[in-house]
């Protein structure tokens, strides 16, 4: 075989492996429960900003992330690249007792190498921002939306919760698909003793100077994203996605996997047709046709038809809240524990070093002992696994073996009250699995390591 032909085959093989690569963990802090927002300025420079007055910066397409310490104490909720070298970020400053002191706006003029505190808004929580240039911008948070024309030195209230019929509430997120047109989602409570909030969508057509409520929704709104002034999407707390094709005047619910229960926290489109979304919650998805269980989980979704349909990867795991794709294949997600994962193609397979020790699994500890008095042993196992029901008041109805792609690979549903159930995982490859123990009205999971 000729050397050039061998080299060509090798290059082709490496390209195929790259396209099919699974997620890779690029950052993790097991001592922190903070989430963060991940965004890229270009194909190489990215930032991850969140809690604990720190942030991460990458200059090599997210392969490595360097830790920076902010001089000011702030929990960052949102940030934005502006111009060639500026970055604005908003968040909150809390005292030692966890009381919110003020909302903060900070700014870097050298791509994050150093930061200055620009403004404090006492007693407010700032959750989102959009700057049109280095002088003009809007921020949103508890009680309303605020606008500046002098780089954050002074602010005008352009929309107020209390002036629009609510006792209290706030705006969660801003999104401007163009210079003039912007959207904001929020919630307000009309009475202090009213247990429910009204969820609403605001729209501005004059660069955030004035805002108007254009629709209200029964579900909690979690994120908003517009491709342009006409086509947009919203994520909701029960895992649904809404789409508009007329600038937010009317919305349709996009059919998604009925067994997904993760809140959609972040949506991004890289073209008119191709988009991505992610989310997570401390409620486990209903594993395919099984009953809803408990535990922490996440979803990653992709559309190639302009958001008409979404393919979804749902599994137990660390909840996610932010997504950013550079192109069709290279993308990032981030979540709890300052987790950053990168993919170069394949989105439905977790890395072999995934931190399963940080995943909540419905009250069953690492030794297989549950609050409902179930013992699962030995764990780790080389193949044979035993499940013993110690408390006869909680009769097991079914036992399922689930892999990390949320696929049920085995079911045992003929169980007597005193039975010691034996499962055989000998035919399964080494890795992480979950044993789902189903009762008449609940389910719980135990993480299993197959050696």
Image: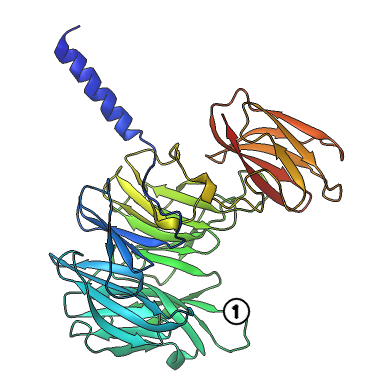
Q: Examine the image and state in which quarter residue 250 appears.
A: bottom left
The structure residue drawn at horizontal position 35% and vertical position 62%, both measured from the top left corner, is 37
**Which residue, as the protein is rendered here, is positioned at the far left?**
84
Q: Secondary structure at mark 1?
A: loop
**Which residue, as the protein is rendered here, is positioned at the far bottom?**
163
The structure residue drawn at horizontal position 35% and vertical position 83%, both measured from the top left corner, is 145
Count of numbered marks: 1
Q: Position of residue 243 (x, y in %)?
A: 42, 61
Q: Considering only vertical position in the picture, is 185 above or below 275?
A: below
Q: Examine the image and state in which quarter residue 415 appears.
A: top right
The structure residue drawn at horizontal position 61% and vertical position 34%, both measured from the top left corner, is 380
Relative to 109, 50 lies left or right: right
Q: Considering only vertical position in the picture, is 448 above or below 139?
A: above
Q: Position of residue 49 (x, y in %)?
A: 32, 63
Relative to 164, 357 lies left or right: right
Display coloring: rainbow
Q: Considering only vertical position in the picture, is 333 above or below 265?
A: above
On the image, numbered disc 1 is attached to which residue? 196
- 50, 175: nearer the viewer: 50
- 253, 63: nearer the viewer: 63
Q: Examine the image and state in which quarter residue 196 appears.
A: bottom right
- 241, 338: nearer the viewer: 338
């Amino acid at each position: 075989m000729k050397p050039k032909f061998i080299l060509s085959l090798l290059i082709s093989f490496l390209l195929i492996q790259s396209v099919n690569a699974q997620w890779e963990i690029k950052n993790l802090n097991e001592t922190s429960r903070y989430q963060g927002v991940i965004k890229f300025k270009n194909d190489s420079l990215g930032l991850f900003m969140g809690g604990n007055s720190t942030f991460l910066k990458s200059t090599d397409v997210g392969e490595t992330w360097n830790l920076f310490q902010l001089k000011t104490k702030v929990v960052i909720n949102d940030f934005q690249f502006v111009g060639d070298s500026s970055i604005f970020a908003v968040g909150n400053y809390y005292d030692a007792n966890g009381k919110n002191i003020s909302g903060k706006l900070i700014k870097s003029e050298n791509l994050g190498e150093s930061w200055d505190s620009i403004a404090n808004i006492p007693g407010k929580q700032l959750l989102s921002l959009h700057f049109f240039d280095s002088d003009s911008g809007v921020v949103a948070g508890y009680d309303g939306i605020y606008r500046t024309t002098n780089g954050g030195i002074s602010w005008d209230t352009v929309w107020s919760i209390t002036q629009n019929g609510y006792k209290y509430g706030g705006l969660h997120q801003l999104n401007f698909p163009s210079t003039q047109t912007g959207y904001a989602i929020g919630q307000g409570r009309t009475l202090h003793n009213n247990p429910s909030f009204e969820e609403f969508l605001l729209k501005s057509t004059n660069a955030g100077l004035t805002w108007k409520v254009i629709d209200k929704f029964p579900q909690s709104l979690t994120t908003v994203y517009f491709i342009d002034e006409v086509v947009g999407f919203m994520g909701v707390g029960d895992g649904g996605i809404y789409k508009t094709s007329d600038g937010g005047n009317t919305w349709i619910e996009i059919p998604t996997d009925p067994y997904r229960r993760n809140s959609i926290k972040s949506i991004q489109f890289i073209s008119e047709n191709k988009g991505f979304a992610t989310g997570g919650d401390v409620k486990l998805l209903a594993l395919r046709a099984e009953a809803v269980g408990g535990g922490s989980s996440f979803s990653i979704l992709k559309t190639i038809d302009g958001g008409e349909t979404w393919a979804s990867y749902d599994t137990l795991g660390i909840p996610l809240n932010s997504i950013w794709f550079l192109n069709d294949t290279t993308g990032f997600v981030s979540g709890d524990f300052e987790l950053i994962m990168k993919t170069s193609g394949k989105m439905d397979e977790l890395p072999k070093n995934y931190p399963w020790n940080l995943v909540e699994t419905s009250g069953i500890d690492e030794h297989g002992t549950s609050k409902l008095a179930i013992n699962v042993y030995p764990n780790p196992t080389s193949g044979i696994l035993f499940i013993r029901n110690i408390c006869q008041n909680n009769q097991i109805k079914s036992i399922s073996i689930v892999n990390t792609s949320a696929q049920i690979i085995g079911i045992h549903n003929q169980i007597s009250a005193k039975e010691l159930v034996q499962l055989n995982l000998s035919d399964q490859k080494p890795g992480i699995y979950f044993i789902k123990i189903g009762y008449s009205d609940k389910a719980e999971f135990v993480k299993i390591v197959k050696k």
